[in-house]
Image (cartoon, rainbow, N blue to C red):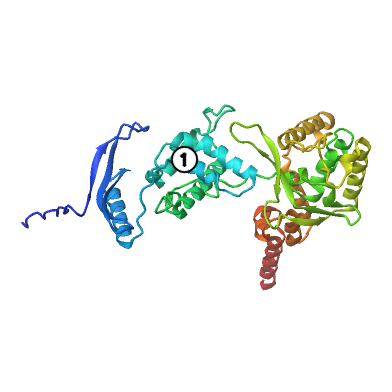
Amino acid sequence: MAPPRKTRRRSPGEGGAFSYMTKLRKDPADTGLRWFWKAPIRMPDGTTKIRTKSGFLTKEAALAAMQEAMVSGRKGTYVEPSKRTVGDWLDEWTGTLRHRPSTIASYRKNIRLHVKPYIGDLPLASLTSTRLTRLYRELEANGRRDGKGEPSGAGLSARTVRYIHTIIGAALAAAVEAEPPLLTRNPAAKAIPPSAQEAQAPEQHPWTASQLRAYLNWARGNSDLYPTWYVLAYTGIRRGELLALRWRDVDLNAATMSIQRTAGIVRNAGEGARIEEGPAKTKKSRRVIDIDPATVAVLKSWKRERGELSLALARPDALVFSTLEGQHLHPERYWRSFKSAQARCRETLGDDAPPEISVHDLRHTHATLLLSAGEPVKTVSERLGHANVGITLAVYAHVLPGDQKRAASRFAALVEEAI
């Protein structure tokens, strides 16, 4: 029998991995066993220093990380572990962004409610892809918060969790690119968020032409917001674009509408909600669209009514749709007004009333009716302001069955001819 092979002991200069116990564990099945590595690392200035890093679940993982650090040291690319916490870095990162105010406010809200309570106190350098994956599962199971920021007992949607993953990924990528770097690699790159299929957009519920006509006929004499819903349905613009529209953007003689801006809610912790205008969503979102004669007539009538109330409401720089004081309509209140109006419509029309939809579904209604009628996809894409035609095809593939029907008929004809 061959003698057992001796395990080579590491020399003092090679470093090693060592175990320890932690009490910081939530899972009852977690034994608390963790590993850390300790090794001499060559610094970018040419000196050698002993460095350690803890928090690994296995000895193998600790040793692999140690080897990566030692190789980086020899190449002169070693990054000192940052003493910042995840929460501190996220706060610093959001302060450097040049996105729209509403987008930054959304990032900060998700970070405050769904990231900091879980990993905000964790050292940035010890964050792993495994910990991020566990965070995503926790959010899906019990991540929803009530109005006071307390856990509600319900989980977040896969779409929201994937959005949070996008925020974290961008923040950690910035930490890698920082000067000096705060991370050697992005832990989010190997984390496992909900898939794109799981996080797909909610199902569309567009109205048919007859349903749209039924609602608008009812709304004409029953709501002051009738012109807003008419314009949304007949142009396909977004709610935020509608609420930022000014009379100088509308050429009633040329029958065109210039979409340049969008209005949204900015809500930061400790501050009241405010409505701010920003540039349109993308470069393609800044566009000029044609409007039909009926929509021109609706806008002319609306402008005349506004002018009779106050000349200031019909000036070129005035908002097309605003409060009586000329201020922006509140996007959330506007959505609720549409919801309550549909309820009143159902009370009046009964079974003849169209089914309830969201404000955004008016945009889907516009696109769906045009595509179903055979309008070129490129034309519809330009009206909607999509970044490219591919987005339009992906969003509205279910209303473009024409080619498949022709292909199916052609196949049947080929078989019949062969017979």
For the N terminus, give its image quadrant: bottom left
Pointer 1 local density, CA inside 10 Å: few below 14, some 14–19, many at least 20: some
Quarter placement of the C terminus: bottom right
Of 32 and 36, nearer the camera is 36
* Viewer-closest of 307 and 253: 307
Tell me which residue sits at (57%, 43%) in the image: 159
Q: Is residue 373 visible?
A: yes
> On the image, which quarter does residue 338 sit in?
top right
Horizontally, residue 178 falls left or right of residue 380, namely left
Q: Secondary structure at mark 1?
A: helix
Q: Position of residue 131 (x, y in %)?
A: 40, 42
Give the answer, above or below, for where 327 lies relative to 373: above
| Residue 364 in view in this figure | no
Name the outermost residue toward the bottom: 418
Q: Nearer the viewer, residue 16 or 274?
A: 274
Left or right of 192 on screen, residue 249 = right
Which residue is rendered at x = 82% and y = 32% of the image? 345
- Whole-percent x, y for residue 250 in the image: 85, 51
Which residue position is annotated with label 1?
Answer: 88
How many labels sit on residues? 1
Residue at image point 81% right, 28% down: 347
Judge left or right: residue 46 versus residue 294.
left
Q: Nearer the viewer, residue 203 or 294?
A: 294
Where does the image place residue 294, in percent across and percent down from the top left?
90, 49
The type of residue carrying mark 1 is Asp
x%, y% of residue 163? 55, 45
